[in-house]
Image: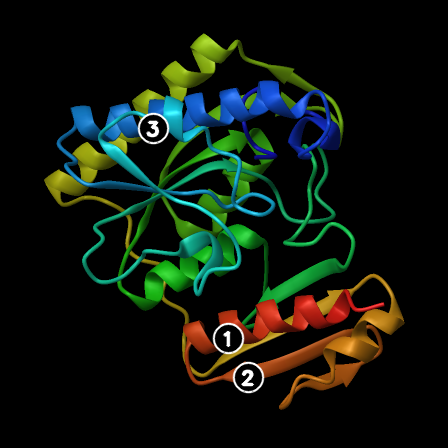
Amino acid sequence: MEGVTGVVNWDQTRPGHAEYARFRKLLTADINAAARGALEAGANDISVVDGHWAGANVLIEELIPEAHLIAGSPSPLSMMQGVDQSVDGVFFVGYHARNGSSNAILDHTWSSLAVANVWLNDELTGEYGLNAAVAGHFGVPVLMVSGDQTACAQVAEQLGDIESAVVKHAVGRYSAECLSPQEAQMQIYGAARRAVERLAAGNAPAAYVVSRPVEIRIEFFASQMADHAVLLPGTRRAGTSISFTSADMLGAYDAFRAAIALSSVE
């Protein structure tokens, strides 16, 4: 939700805050724009995964009827629930840059309270890289992304020549020049349509497949977080960082999520 049209602060993304209801509508509208673009280009089966907070943000009553919603949390594959070999491509709608990025709205990596940095096979990454690698485990490419200019650039740098819809230009962590919802949704619609057209024409980007075994290293903000996370079997520690190795990306993703959950124990 941090990369959705108009979002520039945490209040707009937090359930219970007065601003949240407005931006749930904009989240749903951004998703609908991507879905319409995909449908116009020939897609015939669309799954929407609600990947923010507890997975209860998308307004199902406003979602286009051709899409079905995967909601709630936790689920076995978190933000990538539903991906498998039957899926032809993935869209990242409303994504944000990794923690520590300049000119990036609400930059963070998975947990804004716990995670300073994440490396996937020694490559510094954000949520986009982890999620793309899960899709890549099944041979599924990421086709497009929407968000601010820094998020879109980071995704393209790691994943290759994918379609991008820049809906705001960040000038800090809490400030951006935002497109109007109408213009932003036109950009998203266009990127989604081009992405599916490229897929149909056989010139979509390749799936992001990481080499095996898969190593993940997590740097936490504080030492007590690593104290808890290192309790995960098979984990190694160096200061505020832990690392572990898994046979494949699905195992690494599970271990990553477990380590983050452990790190938040008081």
Q: Are marks 3 and 2 in contact (CB under 8 Å)?
A: no
Mark on residue 245?
Answer: 2
Asked if one can make out residue 79 in the rendered structure from this viewpoint, the answer is yes
**Mark 3 sits on what residue?**
34
Residue 104 in view here: no
The residue sitting at 55% across, 84% down in the picture is: 245
Q: Is disc 2 surrounded by few (<14), some (14 to 19) or many (20+) residues within 10 Å?
A: some
Residue at 57 percent of width and 29 percent of height: 148
**Front position among marks 3 and 2:** 3
Left of 135 or right of it: where is 233? right
Crowding near pointer 1: few (<14 within 10 Å), some, many (20+)?
A: many
The answer to whether 139 is drawn above or below residue 10 in the figure is: below
Q: Secondary structure at mark 1?
A: helix
Residue at the location (84% across, 78% down)? 239
Q: With respect to residue 207, does 21 lie above or below?
A: above
Q: Position of residue 169 (x, y in %)?
A: 61, 22
Q: Nearer the viewer, residue 158 or 236?
A: 236
Q: Residue at x 67, y 84 (%)?
A: 232
Circle 1 residue: 252
x%, y% of residue 130? Answer: 50, 60
Question: For the image shown, how many numbered marks are present on the structure?
Answer: 3
The picture quadrant where one finds residue 161 is top left
Q: Amino acid at mark 2?
A: Thr
Cα distance between the residues tagged 2 and 1: 7 Å
- Quarter of the figure with the N terminus: top right
Amino acid type, residue under disc 3 in the picture: Ala
Question: Which of these two is toward me, 232 or 151?
Answer: 232
Q: Quadrant of the C terminus?
A: bottom right
CA neighbours of label 3 inside 10 A, class few (<14), some (14 to 19), many (20+): many
Q: Earlier in the sequence, mark 3 or mark 1?
A: 3
Query: In terms of secondary structure, where does tag 2 sit?
Result: strand
